[in-house]
Amino acid sequence: MDYHRELVLILDFGSQYTQLIARKVRELGVYCEIYPYNLSIDTISAMKPIGIILSGGPKSVFDEDAPKCDEGIFSLGTPILGICYGLQLITQIFKGEVGKSKKREYGKAHIYIDREDPFLKGLSDGDVVWMSHQDRIYRMPEGFLSIAHSDNSPYAVIKKEDSNIYGVQFHPEVHHTKKGKEILRNFLYDICGVRGLFSPKSFVELSVEKIRDTVGNGKVICALSGGVDSSVVATLVHKAIGNNLCCVFVNNGLLRKNEAQEVLDLFKDRLHLNLKYVDGEERFLKALENVKDPEKKRKIIGRLFIKIFEEEANKIGKVDFLAQGTLYPDVIESVSFKGPSATIKSHHNVGGLPKKMKMKLLEPLRELFKDEVRVVGKELGLPDNVIYRQPFPGPGLAIRVIGDVTGERLHILKEADSIVREEIERKERFRHIWQSFAILIPVKTVGVMGDERTYANVIALRIVESEDAMTADWARIPYDILDRIARRIINEVPGVNRVVYDISSKPPSTIEWE
Ligand code: XMP
C-alpha cells in the first residue's frame, strides 16, 4: 500500500526540533514531509495531506517579520496541530492574544487535564512535558477550548471546539516530554485517522516498484564505497533491476585494513551484485607522492576517483542513470528547497560526480533520514557491520597519515587502526561512539624495548562522541580499554613505540587531524 496516501505535512517555522517532529511521526508509521512555512495553499491542497503540523520557531508572532502560513489551511477540514510557535500562530489567526511571558518557561513542567479529549488519551494529571518558550496565550482564540494547563501556562493544550485543530505549548517531539509519543500517536491515529502505512517493508516494496517504473530496461551505475548509504542504495536498486545495475568499487588503497576484501565478499560473493572492482592503489599512491597539504590531498583523491569512475562508466557503454545516496536532510537543506533566504551549508560530500556525465539521477533514499536508512538496510538483509559502520572520510587514510603518504606509512596506520576497530568499533557496547580511529603523526620519539633504545613512530587515538559531526567531544573510554589498545599497538605494530590519546573537543578542534 502506498504510504504517500497518508501524508502528514510539517510546516517549518524554524524550530531546532522540526526534523525531530518528522522522525517521531515516521517512527509511528506515518510518512511525513517538511516544507517551508509559506508553502502555497494550492500546493498544500494538491498534496491532500491527512494532517498538518505547524512546528515551533524562534520568532514571536507579533514580530514584524514573523513567519505566517497561508490561513487557507484552516478551511481545508484537515486536522492541524500547532506546536509552540504553531500554537501561538493559531491563537493570533483566530483572534486570541499572545504576549511575552513574565517568566520564560524553559525545561520541565507538569500538565493538568481540564477536559477529556481523545488527543490526551493515556495522559494523567502531573505528566511531565518539555517547555521552551517566551510568549504565551493571554486571551484564548475565538471558538477554542483549553483542554490542559501547566503551572505557568493556563492554556497548555487547546482545541477548536467544532473541528480538529489543536495546539500545544510544549514540545511533544522531544523525549523529555514523557508521553510525547502517545500525544503524537493520538493526533495521528485518533484525530487524523491514519492506519500507519509507512514501514521499512513498505518503503522497500514501493521503492522497488518505483525504481522498476523509472528505469525500465535502462542501465544504472552506482559508486559503491561500502559505507551505509551507498550499500543500501546498491542493494535496493539491485533488488529492483538485478544486473542492469552495475556497481563500481574503486579501491584507492586508502581504505581501512581488509575493507576492500570485505566489500567484495559481501556484495559480489554473498549478495551477487554486478560489481566491478577497480584496483587503483598504485595510481592513488603515485598521485599523492610528496603531497603534504591536506587540501591538496583531498583534491587529488577526489579528481582521480572521478576520472577512474568515468573510465569505468565508458567501458560499460550506454548508461542511463546514476544512483546516489542522497538523504532527506540533504533535500531539505538544499537551496532550491528552502528558497532564496536559505543559508547554504557547505559540507564535505557535496560536489561528487560531474554533470557532464549526462545521466539522470536515481536517488531512492531521498525520503529517508539516516537512522531510517539503517533500518531499511536491515530489512534488505545487510549485516550489522555495514549498517552500523562509522562515518569514514572520502579521502580515507590519506588524511590520517599526517604529512607524506607512503605505502610503508599507510601500512603502519592500517595495522594500528585495525586494533582500534577490533577494540571499539566492533564491540556492541561502543556503538554510541561516533568515530574511533588511529592517526599516524610525522614525529618520531624515543623509547626502550628490551635493552635497546628505539626511535619510532607515534600513533594518536581519536575516539569521539557526536550527534551530527558538527560538534564532538572525546569519549571517556575506560582506562583499561585504552591501556589494552596502547599495549596491543606497541607490541603488534612494528615501527610504533608510543600511543597518545586526543582529548580535544570540536570546536575548537576538528574530528580529523587534517
Ligand atoms: P571534521 O574533521 O571536519 O569532520 O570534524 C567532520 C566529519 O566529516 C568527515 N570528514 C570528511 N568526509 N570527506 C568526507 O567525505 C572529507 O574530506 C572529510 N573530512 C572530514 C569526518 O570523518 C567527520 O565524520
Image: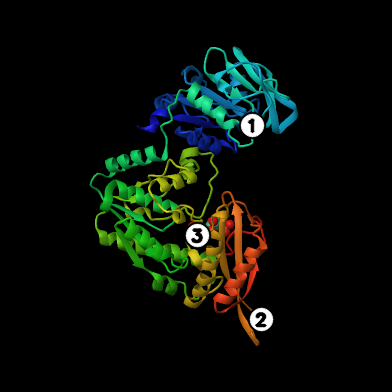
Residues tagged 1 and 3 counted as in contact (Cβ below 8 A): no
Name the residue: 67% across, 25% down: 111
- Image mark for residue 383: none
- Image mark for residue 393: 3
Q: Quadrant of the N terminus?
A: top left
The amino acid type, in three-letter code, at marker 2 is: Val
Asked whether the viewer can see residue 54, the reply is: no
Residue 382 position within the rendered picture, expressed as x and y whole percent measured from the top left: 40, 52
Which SS class for mark 2? strand
Question: Is 283 on the left or on the right of 88, as rendered?
Answer: left
Residue 365, image quadrant: top left
* Residue topped by disc 2: 446
Asked whether the viewer can see residue 123, the reply is: yes
In front here: 270 or 399?
270
Residue 83, image quadrant: top right
Q: Tag count in the figure?
A: 3
Q: CA distance from mark 1 to mark 3?
A: 37 Å
